[in-house]
Amino acid sequence: MRVLFASSLRGWGGGEEWFARAPVALAERGHDVRLAARRGSLLAGRARERGVRVHEVDFGGLADPRAPVELAALFADQHTEVAVANLEKELAALALAGLGRPGVALVGRRGSDFPVRPTPLARWLYGHQVRRVLVNSPGIADTLATQGLRLPRELLHLLPNGLDPLAPDPAERAARAADWPPGPGARLIAVGELSARKDPRGVLAALARVSRPWRLLWLGDGPERAAVEAMAARAPWAGRVRLLGAVPQARRWTAAADALVLFSASEGQPWAVLEALVEGVPVVVTRLPGLEGLVEDGVSGFVVEAGDAEGQALALERLLADPEAARTVGSRGAERAREQLGEGPVYDRLEHLLEGARLAELRQRRAVFLDRDGTLLPEMGALARPDAVRLLPGVAAALRRLGHAGYALVVVTNQAVIGRGLAQPAEVRAVHARLRRLLRAEGVELAGIFVCPHRPEDGCACRKPEPGLLLTAARTLGLGLGESWLVGDTTRDLEAAARAGVRALLVRTGWGGAEPGARRPQDRPAAAACDDLAAAARRILRGS
Ligand SMILES: [Mg+2]
């Protein structure tokens, strides 16, 4: 895919963090990715540092024509297929840039718990232009579906923020721990700007009621700094609160804390809390839609109400009274976070959601499902090195013809090497990134790659001959199985196709239907045999 992310924001917050991370994750998966960021913004600089291809754009007001004109030039240069943005202002600029240029699928992302205001512009955008809206929690999806413009549920797709643990070593933890004020008591941390929204004075007011010893480190800066500093200089806070200012990588300090405190009245899905959760640091947080399902009071964290100093103090007291119980809560929070926020699965999902938007824009419903080893690439056992990827002869040209005929090209591959520990998921992703790039250089765009990582003995529903991979791909990408074909080199492929209701062709490359444990010809689904993918493509094109 050719994807353009766009963000007009100047500062740095959760949304910008996402817009700096998501392009990296998609580029690692072999997509052509660019980011349109506001000229001179923090995002432009930081995303570039992370290796993102950044274009600085003059985002003005809605009446300013510069952004649509600059974005239209970017569309033309990149041949953009999918454009992702979070604010109505950027979506409008992208929609205007795409007028008279069909084929750009617009995808919105909402990371904050505000309804969409029912303006004529928003009605036009969400009613006619935007293909999908990504939201990072069920609570935020509810807000968007039931308040304001009330977006249709089928437009909303759940995509949590992805985050893997950092797990710093004990030496680094000790070094960061030295930044807390000296003295007895648990090391508490708060991360976020010193502004009314994060309620820093409320945090101090709650702490004033806590009887057990504590020390607080606040990372972040903002308009309330002077007021908070003045308050913290007085009893009972004097000597127990340190404002360290804004630091890059606040999560390195979070990992060294005993607990994280966040008392905001309104937030999306705050990264600071996710960062604490993945490290197993217990959190005391206000009830936020973005944390629903992640932080459950007394189980995987402590939940308080915004503005309720007494309730907040009680929760802190509870946390400090029993460090052992707090650690248990922290590890349960980490378990949930790892299940839900793992970067690999989360960004795989982002990739598939954008691929589905692309196909919806192209109105493609029919697909050719392609086995990987023995069909596209030589059958060579475990393949974990991107530089070992070689296409079989004639594969690129055959796929190009199928693509031009309107077939979505979807790879479905069993990779038990992952389940057996012979290849890491990241290595398989790198192999697939290389496959995508090789094919893109030949004018072929894959519509998706779906991987079963399990071993045969795991009994999953996705490993071919089970039909699960095909069913998932069809559901995720909006494909019609009855209009589609599968090409593969094993009897497992043929059986998966038959069970999913997809017509199949066997190629004589790779195993040619004689893999170990293959079904005998009379026992397997009927399928014509072709010499190779080129012959299979000719047959599909004749029959369609
Ligand atoms: Mg194969």
Image (cartoon, rainbow, N blue to C red):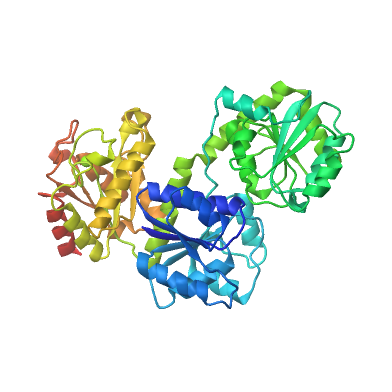
Vertical relation: 229 (above or below) 12? above
The picture places residue 366, in percent across and down from the top left corner, at 30, 61
Left or right: residue 297 versus residue 487 is: right
Q: Quadrant of the C terminus?
A: bottom left
Q: Up-down: is 62 above or below 445?
A: below
Q: Quick one: which residue is furthest to the left in this view?
A: 531
In this orientation, which residue lies closer to the viewer: 196 or 458? 196
> In which image quadrant can residue 156 be found?
bottom right
- Residue at image position (85%, 44%) is 230
Percent coordinates x, y for residue 262 in the rendering? 72, 42
State the image quarter where residue 396 is shown: bottom left
Q: Residue furthest right?
A: 235
Q: Nearer the viewer, residue 249 or 148?
A: 249
Q: Quadrant of the N terminus?
A: bottom left
Return the residue nearer the eye: 176 or 503. 176
Where is residue 526? Give x, y as percent: 17, 47
Q: Position of residue 297 (x, y in %)?
A: 71, 36
Of residues 387 and 157, the one drawn nearer to the viewer in this rendering: 387
User: Taking the image as drawn, is residue 79 in sight?
Assistant: no
* Residue 124 shown left or right of residue 348 in the figure: right
Is residue 229 something that shows in the picture? yes
Q: Is residue 195 left or right of residue 66?
A: right
Identify the residue shown where x is 27% and y is 48%: 435
Query: Residue placed farthest to the top in the image?
Result: 324
